[in-house]
Amino acid sequence: MKYTFCCVGESEEMMLKAAGILKAAFMALGNSHWPDLEAALQEVRECVAAPNICMGLCDGSSLLGWVGLRPMYEKTWELHPMVVSPASQKNGAGSMLIAELEKRAREQGIIGIALGTDDEHEQTSLSQVDIDSENIFREITNIRNLNRHPFEFYKKCGYSIVGIIPNANGRRKPDIWMWKDISSGNDAISGRLIEQT
């Protein structure tokens, strides 16, 4: 299969496709952050605005997923969002998007990427205990994935857990913060034919 990277902000049609994926992917996880297409489209518009980096992965005219990067600090930016259509998950699309995003970020002089990945649905062991100053580092060190939480995907992409915000989204619903040094790296993706547009 031949994939291409595309600009999510290139047209209203592409932004609508991106909004549809954002809404569908998060609703499939039980999250109603973007409950309708208009709310999702507003998020897409914010993500494509300068100076953000926002790009998608296409198979022909089909948008498989998209990713955004926005300023957080001078040289470390925040990955937000990272979304792949439910039908396109588990085929490498997410890894390809992350690798290309990191490459483009390095080209702009960014040296680190941070991201937050919430556990709002008891998907990790962090949601099974009350986190406090006595156990926070032990619980982070011993984190277990109970139900397909994306922190493991990010770990496979080279990101490390650098902390959590306990109860960020309610009692026992932490936000897991991850980070990666991208100042040097290998962008090769084996077994995939990619064209940049």
Image (spheres, rainbow, N blue to C red):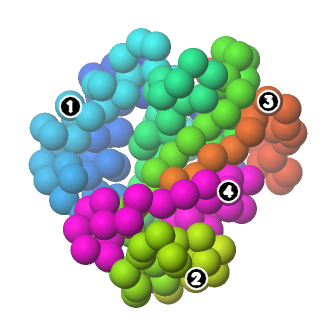
Q: Is label 1 or label 3 in front?
A: 3
Q: CA distance from mark 2 to mark 1?
A: 34 Å
| N-term mark: 2 or 1 | 1
What number is the disc on residue 144? 2
Start-end of magenta stretch: 147-173
Q: Nearer the viewer, residue 134 or 177?
A: 134
Residue 65 horizontal side relative to residue 195, left or right = left
Q: How many marks?
A: 4
| N-term mark: 2 or 4 | 2
Q: CA distance from mark 1 to mark 3?
A: 32 Å
Q: Which residue lies under the disc numbered 3?
A: 183
In the rendered structure, which amino acid carries the disc numbered 1? Gln
Residue at 42%, 12% (x, y): give it.
Answer: 50
Residue at 69%, 44% (x, y): give it.
Answer: 180
| N-term mark: 4 or 1 | 1
In the rendered structure, which amino acid carries the disc numbered 4? Ser
| N-term mark: 4 or 3 | 4
Residue at 40%, 85% (x, y): give it.
Answer: 129
Q: CA distance from mark 4 to mark 3?
A: 15 Å
Q: Which residue lies under the disc numbered 4?
A: 160
Q: CA distance from mark 3 to mark 2?
A: 29 Å
Q: CA distance from mark 4 to mark 1?
A: 30 Å
Q: Which residue lies under the disc numbered 1?
A: 42
Q: Are marks 2 and 1 in contact (CB under 8 Å)?
A: no
Q: Is label 2 or label 1 in front?
A: 2
Residue 78 horizontal side relative to residue 46, left or right = right
